Image (cartoon, rainbow, N blue to C red):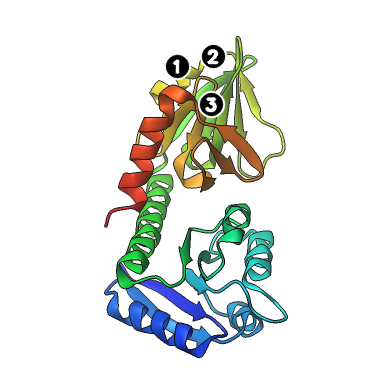
Amino acid sequence: MKIKCIAVDDEPLALGLIKSFIQKTPFLNLIGWYSSAGEALHYLKTQRVDIIFLDIKMPKLNGIDLAKILLENNQQDSPRVVFTTAHDRFAIESYRVDALDYLLKPFGYDEFLRASKKALAYYEQKKMNQQSSQEGLNIFVRVGHQLVRIPCHDIIYIEGLKDYVKIYLTGSSKPVITLATLKSLEEKLPLNYFMRVQRSYIVALDKIRAVTKTSLWISEVEINVGEQYKAAVQEIFNKRFDNS
């Protein structure tokens, strides 16, 4: 699998180093490089890119602002961002703009490769999810007197309450509410795509946009990871994104 990527940095030496790292990595395909975020944005309006290796501190339009623009576009094929910066103070903000990783300069090839493997794992998982949706993985839940079919790839997360659950779906402002237990739904879901992260929540792994030590973000919703689930969550993300 080849991942299309561009590099953006206003420092020629840093840009040259990132270009060399990309060209050294077999599964990365360098299709462009730019010395400003504005140039990159102009290119992205007409070209599809998978990953942007993006500096943050740049004149006029900075890297965080470019990432915000891409996030607000909310397109299914929007590129993911790996920040490459000398400033650690933007780390928290990078979570909020759905950054895939955050490389702190100066970094070597090993760190770059680790971040690139996260990108590879992300797109391999995305491809699997697309295949699973084409194969028609669904669950059926009872809503009132009807059985309602819910495609698994539409599920963002599921919240368990006392006697019922709320299923939050892409493209819908209101959750589907069904009389069921979280455990019964957990048993119906494909294991490779969903995970229980606390007593009251199951999340779709491909919908997670950011993770910290104690919580994860899905869209603008922060979900705390339960103490007994932290080790399992960490293990999943190590396997998916840190296969160095």
Q: Which residue is mark 2?
A: 180
- Distance CA(mark 3)–CA(mark 2): 14 Å
Mark 1, Cα crowd under 10 Å, few <14 / some 14-19 / many 20+, is few
Q: Give the labeled residue for mark 3.
A: 201
> Could you tell me which residue is drawn at 64 percent across and 27 percent down?
176
Classify mark 2: residues with Cα within 10 Å, few (<14), some (14-19) or many (20+).
Answer: some
Which quadrant is the N terminus positioned in?
bottom left
Residue 78: quadrant of the picture:
bottom right
Residues at discs 2 and 1 in contact (Cβ within 8 Å)? yes
x and y percentages locating residue 158 in the rendered image? 56, 28
Q: Nearer the viewer, residue 184 or 79?
A: 79
In the figure, is residue 67 to the left or right of 111?
A: right
Q: Quadrant of residue 57?
A: bottom right
Res. 64 in view: yes
Residue situated in front as seen by the camera: 112 or 182:
112
Q: Earlier in the sequence, mark 1 or mark 3?
A: 1
Where is 197 relative to 126, above or below?
A: above
**Tag 1 residue:** 184
Label count reads 3
Check the image and report above or below for 203 versus 243: above
Give amino acid for label 1.
Ser
Residue 198 rendering spot, x and y as whole percentages: 50, 24
In space, the residues marked 1 and 3 are separated at their CA atoms by: 13 Å
